[in-house]
Amino acid sequence: MKATKVFFIITFLFFTVNTIFSKEKAKHVILIGLDGWGSYSVEKADMPNVKKLMNDGTFTLKKRAVLPSSSAVNWASMFMGAGPELHGYTDWGSKVPDLPSRVIGENNIFPTIFQLLKVTNPNAEIGCIYDWAGIKYLIDTISVNYWEQSPDYNQFPESLCDMAVKYITDKKPDFAAIIFDEPDHTGHQAGHDTPEYYTTLTRLDSYVGKIIEAVKNAGILDETIFIVTSDHGGINKGHGGKTMMEMETPFIISGKNIKSGQTIEESMMQYDIASTIACIFGLEQPQVWIGRPMLHIFK
């Protein structure tokens, strides 16, 4: 009798956990990345669109970058669900693994969230648009339907936003990553936590608003989850070190099936983003990933 009861409890738990991970939470995910955006700036920044997503959804300002607190290593970790010790991209500008990747997946690259979605759903529309050329080495372009770098954003600062609006309107992507190379550029030139830095954040917020409006106009708003996040912060005119201004970055998630008005109190790392996106799409993550989906953010 006891054995039968235990069997039913185990079976129930198995199907409960399986349902949590396999059930799709939303049909569309729009990831907006702001390179060099430190959590320290959020309270002081004039970013009404981003702060509305925070209020309507769930967020943390305590997500930590991996070391070093620089670009390629952290975008790789965000897309690859693991740290540099496993995926092998260890420097700010890594184009190939500096260490041998622990696992080589489809298309001769460490498994990415783009690859995982495409293998599971070959018909998925997946896009990545970016300012910084280094992004293309980290996403597995073979798994992406559309990937393109914007023109020189110093001359055409709105070009990436315009490209994103057009792509969302025309293709209604299942998953799109839109990666701006600001406010990092301003941080290097004028400095972090400067008036120029906050002016750039306000401009970026206007782009976030336009992207949200494009999703609405495409008729997919009710089935979309937005994520706004960053690779690293900064201090003075640089980053890569171990200060909390460099290490702590925002993670904001809002939309379909996301709890409203919540903060994430649990620990969150850069590589947990890939796992959370995999959970949204009901994907089984590879064993080599060490990221953990933020399950408590879902309704």
Image: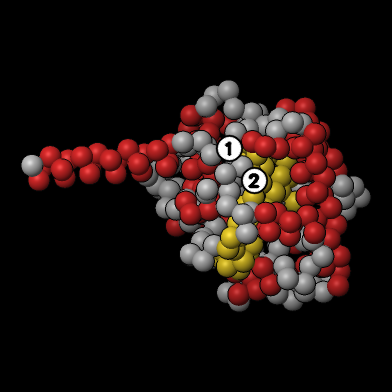
Point out the residue furthest to the top here. Answer: 123
Looking at the rendered image, the quarter that the N terminus falls into is top left
Q: Which residue occupies 71% across, 30% down?
A: 172
Say how many tags the image has.
Answer: 2
- Disc 2 from disc 1: Cα separation: 9 Å
x then y, percent, for residue 71? 64, 58
Determine which quarter of the picture holds residue 169: top right
Amino acid type at circle 2 is Gly
What residue would you read off at disc 2? Answer: 255
x then y, percent, for residue 206? 84, 53
Nearest the camera: 249 or 135?
249
Q: Residues within 10 Å of mark 1 (few under 14, many from 20)?
A: many
x then y, percent, for residue 135? 66, 46
Tell me the colour scheme of the image: secondary structure
Nearest the camera: 26 or 6?
6
Which SS class for mark 1? Answer: loop
Q: Give the side of residue 197 with respect to residue 1, left or right.
A: right
Which SS class for mark 2? Answer: strand
Q: Give the side of residue 298 with respect to residue 177, left or right.
A: left
